[in-house]
Amino acid sequence: MIDLTISIREDPGAPEHVFRLLAGDGQPHAGTTLPDPGAALAAVERFGEDIFFPKPGPPKLCTQQYGGPQVAVVTGTFHGRTVHSTFTRTDGCEIARWKAMAPLLGGTAT
């Protein structure tokens, strides 16, 4: 079962947008409010384990580029595990995480 709440701000002073993804058995359930629930579920199933629960490893080298002031916070449960993950666009690694989960963050896959 997947029950995630996504809170997004375009910049610190902007209003917060809140979406929800409810899913089980590979299908979005009623109550999901994302623009493209199927794409969001596909992104979560493909990247969720690694992004929500990263395994320790060597430090990553990230390009020092700025992708914008957007911040998204994802909370809830993913296959029985508690999720509390923050997404930003502050460097190359964070931009890559954002792009991977774009459908979950209310955008489109790129």
Image (cartoon, rainbow, N blue to C red):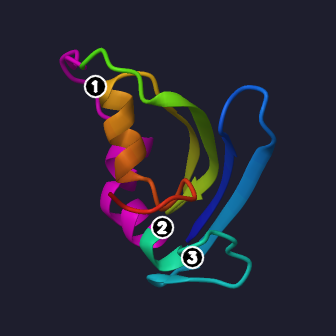
- Mark toward the viewer: 3 or 1: 3
Quarter assignment of residue 90: top left
Horizontal and vertical percent position of residue 24 = 53, 79
Q: Which residues are magenta?
A: 40-62
Q: Is residue 47 highlighted in magenta? A: yes
Q: Is residue 5 highlighted in magenta? A: no
Residue at the disc numbered 1: 56
Give neighbour class at mark 3: few <14, some 14-19, many 20+ (Cα, 10 Å).
Answer: many
Horizontal and vertical percent position of residue 61 = 19, 17
Under mark 1, the amino acid is Pro
Residue drawn at point x = 31 percent, y = 29 percent: 93
Of 4 and 55, nearer the camera is 4
Mark 3 or mark 1, earlier in chain: 3
- Mark toward the viewer: 1 or 2: 2
Under mark 2, the amino acid is Ala
The image's mark for residue 40 is 2
Horizontal and vertical percent position of residue 100 = 34, 51
Q: CA distance from mark 2 to mark 3?
A: 10 Å
Residue at the disc numbered 3: 23
Q: CA distance from mark 1 to mark 2?
A: 26 Å
